[in-house]
Image (cartoon, rainbow, N blue to C red):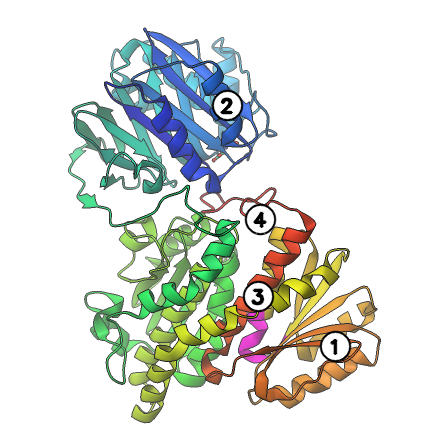
Amino acid sequence: MCGIVGAVAQRDVVDILVEGLRRLEYRGYDSAGVAVVNNGELKRLRRLGKVKELADAVDASPTPGGTGIAHTRWATHGEPSERNAHPHVSNDQLAVVHNGIIENHTALKKELEAAGYRFDSQTDTEVIAHLVHKIRQESDDLLSAVQQAVKKLDGAYGTVIMDTNDSDRLVVARSGSPLVIGLGIGENFIASDQLALLPVTRRFVFLEEGDVAEITRTSVRVFDKDGNPVEREEHESTISYDAGDKGQYRHFMLKEIHEQPHAVTNTLEGRLGKDSVLDETFGNGAAELLKKVKHVQIVACGTSYHSAMVARYWMESLANVSCNVEIASEFRYRKSVVQPNSLLVTISQSGETADTLAALRLAKDLGYLGSLTICNVAGSSLVRESDLAFMTRAGAEIGVASTKAFTTQLVGLAMLVLSLGKHNGLSAEQQADMVQALKSLPAKLEESLSLAERIEELAEEFADKHHSLFLGRGDQYPIAMEGALKLKEISYIHAEAYAAGELKHGPLALIDAQMPIIVVAPNNELLEKLKSNVEEVRARGGILYVFADVEANFESDENMRVIDVPHCHPWLAPILYTLPLQLLSYYVAIIKGTDVDQPRNLAKSVTVE
Ligand code: GLU
């Protein structure tokens, strides 16, 4: 979580730092701060709340500086407050920003207090500042002090350290939390995400696990975890993104919902042959590896976990490959049995999700055939550390509630199902039919967006409700889960999803006129079963909102609102039905007046456990 930006330049860097934070605000937004070296003195400004508060404070009392660091926080240790906001400082000399959690902070704090250090905040981060300061007393080299200090840290960190006694450089360290160096001309930068630096450079160097680097205006030196100097490859970024540009849309989330037809088109581009998926789609060596796969283990969190659950239905019914799906934070802490010829698949928008990354690393020694990641960020840790990668081409997703990342993940998984199916009995006709279905998907998604007006009207009825139930069957059950998650995330209405057949085993007791029931009902082989579940709810006075295939013959009445969703290939219905549910949660949130793009207590790119 959290956003980090740093710069070493000849010019004043404060505006660059604040603009960088604004672009990273989706990663955390409970407080923000900046520190620069100004005439040899450390100047720091911190504010509770969003980056705008900090930007106003900077405007009100400008403190220019050529070397600086900045941070937008997602609190893990200590409440959101100005006192806990980063940068944290030691002895007016050292300033530190940090992304992650220092797990042994209590023990280190005791040691440092015994050595005379006074702590001003409740954060785990502050130990880094005092620890480096302490070591620095005996070392005249900031780089070496940081190298020694990180050896004492347990946990996860991306951290940047600035020292007024050596203000021409920043020293940065990465372990478990991403950091990327931006290369300029006569100036260099650091950030937790390249998005922050796009206004100043397109040339990036991604740090690897355990790296410590020293950045000056004219040089970048990187050292690996053993302290050996290493060369890390330079990448040219192709991301085109203007953080300030929501276009005609009121929120990034709405923009991103509407971008889905285009994002899916991009994700499909160049990857489909006439009647099959091209092998190169999953990277070098994919054809050889996928041929051998007989079992798939998918590991993911949150929305990505829901896409994995859809894939399980597809994988077993179409590709004839057995498939397990597990939440990463569970997978990584239990002993699991690896099936023969298993492929490990991880799914993450950012490619930096801490639990998913840990699961991948753990799985390296467990005997999988190989690993594949489905990810939206090139150069991210999951992409670099997996054998194969499928890049979703959703573009930058800024709304904290994931939309286009989810649907493009489903497209990636659909292609994986086709590729595995090819070797496991999926007929040539079925493959050709499925490829056609994929090709026609963007137009279907476009059509479904025209439901926005009707959904906006219906959303009025939700605004005063406190609970809701989402129902689906088969591969629509995970879509019901995703719909419920979206509603929770941005409207704060309690929402639960059930496989419709489970209704009578408990949740039916909750049904009354105050509990809206949302049903996803495509026209598939489970339709008649689902209709019976709908009747069970009606008989108990529940108000139903049924998203149904135009050909499914549901009729609206006093207790049932039917929303006609365009007819599509049943295989891809989970992707199509996601959009109306996203729109529903968006409009409910608008009516409730919540902060749609930055919902309370959440952050994007969950880089802590
Ligand atoms: N653990 C640190 C804190 O609570 C850093 C949190 C973050 O990544 O924003 O301050």
* Sequence-first tag of 4 and 1: 1
* Sequence-first tag of 1 and 2: 2
Q: What is the three-letter code of the residue carrying label 4? A: Val
Asked if residue 455 is positioned above or below residue 81 in the image, the reply reads below
Q: Secondary structure at mark 3?
A: helix
The x, y position of residue 330, in whole percent, is: 52, 57
Q: Which residue is mark 3?
A: 452
Q: CA distance from mark 2 to mark 3?
A: 36 Å
Locate residue 389: give its quadrant: bottom left
**How many residues crowd mark 1 within 10 Å: few (<14), some (14–19), many (20+)?**
some
Q: What is the three-letter code of the residue carrying label 2? A: Asp
**Residue 560: assigned label:** 1
For the residues carrying marks 1 and 3, which lies nearer the camera in this image?
3
Q: CA distance from mark 1 to mark 3?
A: 18 Å
Q: Which secondary structure type mostly characterizes the magenta part of the structure? A: helix
Q: Secondary structure at mark 2?
A: helix
For the residues carrying marks 2 and 3, which lies nearer the camera in this image?
3
Residue drawn at point x = 30 percent, y = 25 percent: 7
The x, y position of residue 231, in whole percent, is: 15, 38
Q: What is the three-letter code of the residue carrying label 3? A: Ala
Q: CA distance from mark 4 to mark 1?
A: 28 Å
Instruction: State the extent of the magenta-drawn residues as a range.
Output: 472-479
On the picture, is 548 further left or further right than 349?
right
Do the CB atoms of the residues marked 4 and 3 lie less than 8 Å apart?
Answer: no
Q: Which residue is mark 2?
A: 56
Residue drawn at point x = 29 percent, y = 58 percent: 386
* Sequence-first tag of 2 and 3: 2
Q: CA distance from mark 2 to mark 4?
A: 22 Å
Residue drawn at point x = 41 percent, y = 60 percent: 347
